[in-house]
Every structure is written in C-alpha cells, then in structure tokens.
Image (tube, coloured by chain):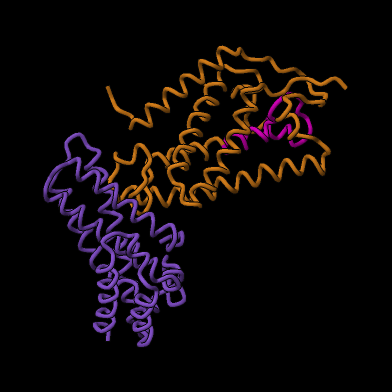
Amino acid sequence: MPKQRVWDLPVRLTHWLLAALIVFSWWSVRNHHTDWHIWSGIAILTLLLFRLMWGFVGSSTARWTSFVRGPRATLDYLRGRWVGIGHTPLAALSVIAMFAVLAAQVGLGLFNEDDDGLYAGPLANFLSPDTTEKIHDLHELNFKLLLGLITLHVAAILYYRIVRGKQLTKPMITGRTTDPAAGEMRPGKWWVALICLGVALAISRWVVAGAPLP
Amino acid sequence: MRTKLFTAGFAFVLVSACGSSSSSQAKNQPANVMNAAVAVAAAKPLSKPQALTVMHDRHEGMEDVGKQNKILRRELTAASPDLAAVRGATATIARHASEATHWFPAGTGPDVGKTGAKPEIWQKPQDFGVKLHNFQVAARALDVAARAGDLNAIKARYADIGGTCKACHDSYRTDMHH
C-alpha cells in the first residue's frame, strides 16, 4: 500500500518535544530542581508559540482551519461519514483542549512562585505575594486537568490501535500513513518554519526578561 | 513543661552553635551531644495540644519567612529598592529564625498531625541541627547587611539565606500542600 505524508517535521518535532518536556517538568519539580522546571516551562512556551503560528502558515494538516470544525462535522465523524487526512473533527477537540490547558499551565507558571519565595516565574513580580499564592494553587490544579487530558489522549490512541486496528503513533514518528484517506498533505515551507521559530524565540526571550515595555 | 523543653532545645542549638564557627566543624561534633539534647526532649513527651501548638506556630512562622522572602525578591530586583521594606522583611526573617530553635521538639512529626516536617529531622538530629543553625546564621547576617544598607552586600546575603532554606527543605520537608 502506498504511504502518503500526513504530518510534517515541525508538527512531529513539536509533538514529541512537548511530550518529553511535560515529563521533564513534572520530574524536575518533584526532585527539587525548580530552576530546571522553570526553563522547561519556557521551552514549552516557545514550542506553543511556534505551533500556534505554524497552525496558520504551516502544512495543510498543521493548520487550525483544516481541522477545527463545528459540531456537525464531529457528529458526521461519529456516524462514520467523515473522510479526510489529518486530525479528525473529534481529535480536533482533543488538540484544542490540550493546547489550551497547556497554554494555561505555562501562563500560570510565568506568574508562579514557590512557597519559600526562592524561585519565581519571570512575570511573578507583577503580582503581590498573596496573588501568586493563589496562582501556585491554580498551577497545581491545572496540572491535574492536563494529566486527565493526556490520559484521555493515550487511551484514545490505545482504543484506535486495539479496537479499530488503526496505528496512530507510527505516523506521528515517520510522518507517513498507510491509511487510504482522501486528500493529501500540502507541505509548508521550511523557511517559513524558521521565521516562526525565530519569532517564538524572540517572544520567549522578552518574557524571560520580565516583559519590559519600551 | 513547654518552657523546659524549649530550654532543652535552646541548649541543643547553643551547643551546636558553640562548636560551629564553620559548618564543617559542626558536622564533626560528636553525635551524642545532639542526641542527648533530643533525648531530653523525648524523655518528657509533649501533650498532643502542646505539640499541635508548636506545629501551628512552626507552620505560620515558615509561611511568613516565605512571604518575606518574596517581598525581598521584589525589592532586590526592583530598579530602586525600598530599603525600609527590605529591613522590615529581614528583621522579620531574623526573628522567625531565632524562634525556629523551638520549632522542632521531638513529638511534632507527621505521626502527630499534618506537617511537612519529615521524620528524618529526629532521625538525623545532628545534620538537621547544623542546617537549622546555618539558616539562623544566614538570617542574622542578612539582617545585619540590611541595616548597614549596602545593596550588593544585601543581595549576596539574600542569595546565601536562600541556599540554607533549600539545603534543609530538600532533605527534611515533604511536598506539602496547604
């Protein structure tokens, strides 16, 4: 069966780097490496900014407009009446939820402080210690939400593998699928990806510097 | 009775303070010096209400040290730090640091009530005593620097005290959620 492209390199790299950094963030803060935890969060911020932009100017399957659909398309998919390549309308809901919760987690982290006042996100100084204490609790609470969504994500992949006999992990590694899906991926341009990365790094640097206004 | 225990605890830290002009010296102190002091505390166990009072004071005190630390960071990273605010924070931290001598009598661990204090505090009293002492020394030095008013010196002492907080918390505090 001919293999066709489904995920471009920037999408795959972003996906696996995010997965690794989420694990690292959890491990580092559990093991008293709060400084590493903060840098890991900044790296996640950079990836999210990149992915946000790549969702507008990247390959066809990376674009928000290609997979974010209304409830009708989701119902069509559930009734088995959807054909296409990339995220299904149901998977799109999962993508948006994970992106939003992860963005919230990083956003809260930027304003967070530890109980001892030894470590702080780059924007914590904008808020009073009483407020950052509430942010601290929300950062922990939102992590549970993130964990729930990741569990759902992995469970869905297992469901498709075991019940539907569909491989989803391998395409996210190789970028290619044997799925006889309609349509094909239109790739993005490598130099556009570099520009997105440059902008994402610049914004992250500005945030690390405490978001100074000119 | 609490006074007696506090006296015992105070003597315990005094003993450690006398022998520790540097932390490496303190580490070489014979273990039985510290253990004796803790054993005294253990010989007359605290009643449950007494223990809970100590644990409450400890929690409130530690929380306030954290809060003062946050105020300090805001001031010390500001373009023009408010020296009065800095001095207020360092004085409060120094006060809590001296109170901390009485915060860890035997019988105030997690088996008694909700606390982030690990049982290891009472299993390794000598090492814990050294780390607590280092914090107390750093707190006094920070307060002295704040009163002298040299910002670079204050920042250096602020970094020092952070190291002593972390050294102790990494070993002797659980990840507690309040």
Residue A86 is situated, as x and y percent measured from the top left of the image, at 70, 26
Q: Colour of chain B?
A: purple
The residue drawn where x is 14% and y is 42% is: B150
Q: Nearer the viewer, residue A65 or A162?
A: A162
Q: Colour of chain A?
A: orange
Quadrant of the frame with the C terminus of chain B: bottom left
Main structural element of the magenta stretch: helix, strand or loop?
Answer: helix
Q: Nearer the viewer, residue B67 or B123?
A: B123
Against A203, is B126 above or below?
A: below
Residue B133 is situated, as x and y percent measured from the top left of the image, at 29, 64
The residue drawn where x is 37% and y is 26% is: A206
Q: Nearer the viewer, residue B35 or A58?
A: B35
Residue A11 is situated, as x and y percent measured from the top left of the image, at 63, 25
Residue B69 is situated, as x and y percent measured from the top left of the image, at 27, 51
The residue drawn where x is 73% and y is 32% is: A76
The residues colored magenta run: A73-98
Against B74, is B105 above or below?
A: below
